[in-house]
Every structure is written in structure tokens, then in C-alpha cells.
Amino acid sequence: MTQTDLNALRAEVIPPKGHFIDGQMTDAANGARLDVISPIDGQVITTLAAGGAEDVNRAVTAARRAFDRRVWAGQPPAARKKVLLRLAELIEREALALAVQGVRDNGTEIGMAFKAESGSAAGTFRYYAEAIDKVYGEVAPTAENVLGLVHHEPVGVVGAILPWNFPLMIGAWKIAPALATGNSIVVKPAESASLSILRLAELAIEAGVPEGVFNVVTGKGSVVGEAIGLSMEVDVLVFTGSGGVGRRLLEYSARSNLKRCYLELGGKSPNIVFADVKDLDHAAKVSANGIFRNSGQVCVAGSRLVVERSIHDQFVDALIRHARKLTVGDPLDLSSDVGAVHSKVQLEQDLGFVDKALAEGADLALGGKRILEETGGFYMEPTVMTNVGRNDTLNQQEVFGPVLAVTPFDTEEQAADLANSTVYGLASGLWTSDLSRAHRMIRSIRAGVVHVNTYGGSDGTVPLGGVGQSGNGHDKSLHALHKYVDLKSAWIQL
Ligand code: NAD
């Protein structure tokens, strides 16, 4: 990746985009369009079809038809594997272009987007492609005169509603296992991060996924997302996004066909540092990256630093030193470590959290302001707030921005209590040289993942999901496959 490549790709004009339904780019039935604003400079870079219920209906009908005709579901797993491996190759062929397109609409720094978006999406398609011809049904341990078989059948039509952060990575976590197991899918990307998903749907056709199997409807969540949620023909809904929208999806399900809903929601993840941390400076550097990369817009971001009182000042100083080294700026400039906040609304919300924390008695130790306003883009300084109380807003509510809350503790019990003091339970981290303590803490922290002596970073072999109000499903690993299949038993009298 060179700056010249990036400059060439960013200069490309992005033509207006339609939905992708039944293998074709198509306009919204009512012709409505939506602007895509780049957080890099606040400019409109293209427009999307602003879908309505009629468009969702067209997409779901195409998906159902493809499923009922068994054009994909009826193919042997080894054949689906071949197609999905080809799709992984096509993603790799276009990795940089896909990543840049994604950065232009969502603002993630390109270094991270290249790895976490196209790189990870290709890996995810490859993982599920490779897995699918190795998953067996079961023979039940019955009496001799009967045979009990357990089949894993595709559910039918999957609705996938995606967030704007890491659309390709998170999209692939859902689309790849759904397709590998033989389902059809209707994807609704976030209105501000649809471009790379639309391109992915085109590449899927090129790889050999039959028309109608992989559809994308763009537009507003409250319109397109609601229509998918209420559809009587969508069998399973998979979602990543905020808790508020997650709750709505459960309501849509209850008001329609009781479709299963798997929700991956927000977090307020604690990063706990004990005084016996082996390398304080290294831990401070990783912790700074764990909250500030992608401007804190990472669901597992370590947004609460819970640090043993005896090293509190030393650790906070080290973390601030590393945070100051992060260059915030144009996400397509290779010299930037941190890109843009995704939208003006998000930026205003992030700044509002700083004001609220100050009003509640916290101290501003670093940052706290909008920067680079002259670019027209949405940028914010890495921000550290100390002296944040256990129940203060900044320790309780997800910011989804570059704002770190710091709280000291004195005992292991206090650390565990602070870790578990929110309604969330997505990720966590702990730093210690004491193996027994690490295992005790892994047991006591209520979270989907506990990072030990590191923060963030995992691969597709382990599940990602939350407990509490962080969600009820898991993406990644073989465990994700169960969301996309129904169990069917056959009871055969011999
Ligand atoms: P969001 O909930 O605002 O939007 C997510 C999606 O839902 C978008 O496609 C949006 O258009 C759609 N939507 C909005 N209103 C809807 C409605 N009424 N009905 C149906 N769909 C609707 O979330 P976001 O701002 O895009 O993403 C940020 C959130 O996602 C944060 O809370 C973050 O923690 C969470 N997240 C979680 C994970 C995870 O793995 N748990 C990963 C990434 C992001």
C-alpha cells in the first residue's frame, strides 16, 4: 500500500448506487435517494437508493424464490465451498479498493481498515467455506429398533442488519456462515457505510453465488431495517448495532413471525491493570491503542481503565504519553494513526459525554476537543478523563468515541465489582503477572471475552459475543454456524 495508490483510489468518482436485488443493481421503487457524506471532509461523495418496504419485499421475494428452488441450498457443501473460496480470492484481489471505499464513507484509518475490513473478510469467507464440508449430522444414541437422525438444515431467508463500523468485517461474520450453510440473505448495511457491502454482493455473483441468494437493500434503518424486521418471509435476523435498535428488532419479531433474533450490541468494556503488571509501559501503549484506534468506534474498545491505585498516576501518565504520539487526521493519509469520527452527530455526542463527565466531577487529563475543523471533517482528540466514579455516566454509558474513563481500585474484589458494574458484558482486559489471579478474574468478570496481558485482537477461531445487554448471539468460529441452521430430527422405526 503506497500513498500514491491511496491517492489514486480516493480520487475515483463513485457513481450513484442502487440496491442489489436478484443479481442486479436496481433503483428504489419510489426513486428516492440518500446522500453519503464522507467524514473525511464532510462532503457528499455519492448517493444511495433510499429503500422502502416495497424494495425489501422485492429482495425478500427473490431470496425466498432462490431458496425454494434450491439453486444454492441444494448444491453439495463441497460446491458451495468452491464458490466461497473464489469469493475470498476476489475480495483479496480488490482488497485495497474495497478498504478505501469503506474508509471514504466511514472514516476508519486505512491501516486498520485494510487489515480489519478486506483482509479479515477474505479470511472469514475462507474459514466458513473450508468448514462447511466438514460438519456432520448426528445419529442419536437410541434403542436398537429405531434410528434417530439429526439433520442441520438451512433456515431459509436470513435478514442481516449491519452497523457502520467495520461493515465488511462484521458483514462477513454474518454473510459467510449464512451462505456456507445454504441460506439466502437480505443485507441492510448502515446508510453511512454501504459501499463496500454493495461491491461484495457484485463479487459474490462473479464468484458463482446464484442470483437472488445474496441481496442488499440500502436506506434508512427506520424504514428498510423495520421492513426486514417485520417481514413474514425472513426466518432469522442477525444484527450488530446499538441496544436501542436491538430492542426494536425483538419487537418486530414478536409483531410478525417470531423470527429468531441474534443481537450483537454495545459495550462499556473494562481494562483492568494490576500493580504487578509485567511491563507497565507496554500495557499503557496497548491500552491506549485499545481505546483510541478508529477513534474509539470499536465495539470491544477498552473504554474504562480500571487501575490499581498504587500505580494509577504512573500508568495514566504512560498512557497519555502514548496517546499523544497518535496522529489524528485524514484516514487515507498513511501518516495518520487515527482517522475520523464517523459523523457529525457522533462527534457532537462524544463531546457531550466530555461535558457531562466534567459536570459530574471528573477531571480532563487529555484532549476533549474537536480538531481539524477547517478540513470540514469530523475529528476528535484522544481524550482521557480521570476521577470518574463507579456510577457516573461516563462509566455507565457507551460513548463509541475516543473517550477513556479512568477509575482506581484497591483490591481484587473492587476490581471485579467495577468490571461488572454496568448493564453490558462484551469485552474486558486484565494485566497481571499472577497466573492464579488471572484465572480468578477470568471467572469473576461477566463478559464475552477477557483479554489477558493484551487488549483486543483475536482471529476467526474464537467466538465474539456478549452477555447482559451486550447481546445474545455469537459471531465467528464454528459456534456461529448454529444461528443459520435448524435442527430437524428423523425418528425411524426399524
Ligand atoms: P445502530 O443501532 O444505530 O444501527 C445499526 C443498524 O441498524 C444500521 O444499519 C441502521 O440503519 C439500522 N437501524 C437503525 N434504526 C433501525 C430500526 N428502527 N429498525 C431496524 N434497523 C434499524 O448502530 P450503529 O451506530 O450503526 O453502530 C454502533 C453500535 O454498534 C454501537 O453500540 C456498537 O457498540 C455496536 N457494535 C457492536 C458490535 C458487536 O460485535 N457486539 C460490533 C460493532 C458495533
Image (tube, grey):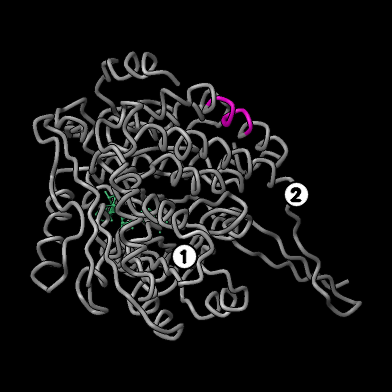
Instruction: Name the residue rendered at 25%, 53% in the picture.
Output: 401
| Quadrant the C terminus occupies | bottom right
Q: Nearer the viewer, residue 299 or 317?
A: 317
Placement of 237 over or under 52, stated as above or below: below
Q: Amino acid at mark 1?
A: Gly
- Marks 2/1: CA distance? 34 Å
Instruction: Determine whether the beta carbon of the residue marked 1 sits less than 8 angstroms from the nearest atom of ligand 1.
Output: no
Q: Are marks 2 and 1 in contact (CB under 8 Å)?
A: no
Residue 119 in picture, x, y percent from top left: 52, 34
Q: Where is the N terminus found, in terms of image quarters? A: top left
Residue beneath label 1, please?
429
Tag 2 residue: 134
Q: Viewed as shown, does residue 133 lie left or right of 398?
A: right
Instruction: Determine the image quadrant of residue 337.
Output: top left
Question: Can residue 54 be seen?
Answer: yes
Q: Does residue 164 lie above or below 49 as drawn?
A: below
Q: Which label lies toward us, 2 or 1? A: 1
| Dot 1 alpha-carbon crowd within 10 angstroms: few under 14, some 14 to 19, many 20 or more | many
Q: Is residue 56 something one can see in this rendering?
A: no
The residue carrying pointer 2 sits among few (fewer than 14), some (14 to 19) or many (20 or more) residues within 10 Å by Cα, namely few
Quadrant position of ligand 1: bottom left
Q: Position of residue 199 (x, y in %)?
A: 41, 28
Is the residue indicated by label 2 positioned so its CB lies within 8 Å of ligand 1? no
* Residue 130 x %, y %: 69, 42
Residue range of the region highlighted in magenta in the rendering: 85-90
Of the image marks 2 and 1, the number of the one nearer the N terminus: 2
